[in-house]
Image (cartoon, rainbow, N blue to C red):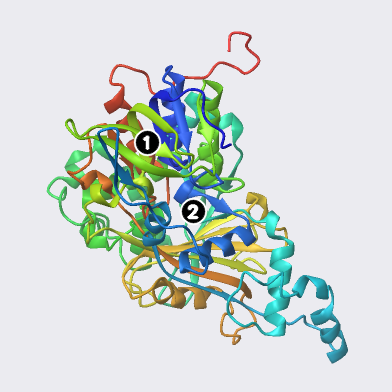
Amino acid sequence: MPQQLEVTEYDVIILGTGFVESILAGALARIGKSVLHMDTNEYYGGSWTSFNFQELLDWAQLLQGHVEESSGNSQENFEGKKALPINFSKARRQAYSTIEYEIYGILKQTNSTEENEEYLHKDEQDTSEETIRHVSTSLSNFERETLAKLLKESKQYNLDIAPKIMPCRGELIELLISSGVGRYLEFKALDKTYIYSDQDTFDKVPCSKEDVFTSQTVTLIDKRKLMRFLTFALDFTNSPETFEGYEEKPYEKFLKEKFQIDGKLLSAVLYAITLIQTKANDVNTIQGLTYTQRYLKSLGRYGNAAFLVALYGAGSEISQGFCRISAVFGGIYMLNHSIKHLLIDKSSNNFTGLIDVNGQQLSSTYLITSIDYIPEKLLQENEECEQISRAIVIIDRYIHEEGDASLTIFPPDSVGNEYPIRVLQFSEGTRSCPEDKYVLYMSTKASGKSAKEDLYKALEKLVNISNDDASLSSPLFVLFYRHKFRDATLSSLLPDNIIVTNDSDSSLDFETATIQAKQLFEKMCPNEEFLPAVPDPDDDDL
């Protein structure tokens, strides 16, 4: 007999444990709302989650269609209501495309053929057909050896499928501090940024005053220009005469004409400090100055770094932190629990409840959901939605300097790319991988036919992917995929009491998603405080 919930009516039912849904779960439970939080997945995080290595392979194969899943149900009538079928598996697969992965065989450097043979065949049980059943393509012996080692260390990996970093001053960090969720999390500083130049070099970007003074790659004249600009940008609103007439003009034009910043220095300001995600002409001066100011104000709060990296996988760890707040204040959680239908009242067109996999009817005043749970009949496909090309790369050593976390930028057109390519490098210090490995997260706005096409040339500059440059680190595994940023708020078909959260976007941080969570909460509960501080766990009044 399937387990049934004793309570069947709630203030809010939330489907999906992604970043925004989890913040809302914590915020609503905190003010006394009854919350039922469900997820078809058996893990937290939704499209923001992190996987160990074997889970990542399973996920990639699932999206490629190598694993069968049950199809959705047909529309029915249920007690005078429309019962709209949910096809979670189909919706999830449609969000991802151009999925390709490659496993690379690495020869051990020895002086004898016998030693290489011994290396290849040791731990033979780990290279059995059972161990490599996750890979559908044929593998060479050395590729089998690589795969076996990655699977053996699988649980030491926490691989983000939508990697993000967090500004040291911003919406999320302040929310983590004020709500108390930050006490559940650990962070490392991202304290190095590099930019690829047309001289085929990677230059370290000076961000603070100390960096500018000690930089060996910036000329004395450029140091003076940069210091003058950074001093202005930190408090630009106090000098409106400086940007008067440039407000809506491209930021690039403002930097060139008002501060004589050009060449490599211009690229560093635009793409490594301002972190522009598109082409330079797409960002006006006010936007650019606002982004630059946020970056500068983040420096110095937690050392000489503007960003923090959450340990053990950012999206899932932060999501679980907010879910913990929800559970403390009465939220009920059900993972690995499928939903069959959403119930819509025929006369009012309002959501009234849902039917779960056990056939139980559950009701609520509001439904908050990720877009994966929205029936196709309620969606309007946005043909112009943003798509993000991503890659997860496991390598055998660091690409620039040893350290816990760094960021590398490829400006537009530097390797044939239309948009900036951002590359995060994480080490064992971030709990993303074993101590002798590193993880690269590559991302850019989609422009070519596939994620591999968008990112491959940049990857060739970072690792020895073609076996022609032994000075570069060697790749062990590469996964390319494209993720669609779906925005259901554009649909006019949705009932008023269904609130849909957006997917992870192409930005490097959580700021847009955090702002969305706050705005949705204020829409639902306009007179309530958003995630007030939680009492100390040792307080008897909790």
Q: Which residue is mark 1?
A: 354
Residue 61 appears in the figure: yes
- Kindly indicate the quadrant of the structure image that contains residue 82: top left
386 over 311 or under it: above or below: below
Front one among 378 and 323: 378
Quadrant housing the N terminus: top right
Tell me the SS state at disc 1: strand
Task: Give the number of the disc on residue 470.
Answer: none
Q: Which residue is mark 2?
A: 163
Quadrant housing the C terminus: top right
Amino acid on which the number 2 mark rests in the picture:
Pro
Q: Is residue 156 left or right of residue 377?
A: right
Determine the CA span between mark 2 and mark 1: 32 Å
Front one among 142 and 308: 142
Front one among 494 and 160: 494
2 vs 1, front mark: 1
439 over 380 or under it: above or below: below
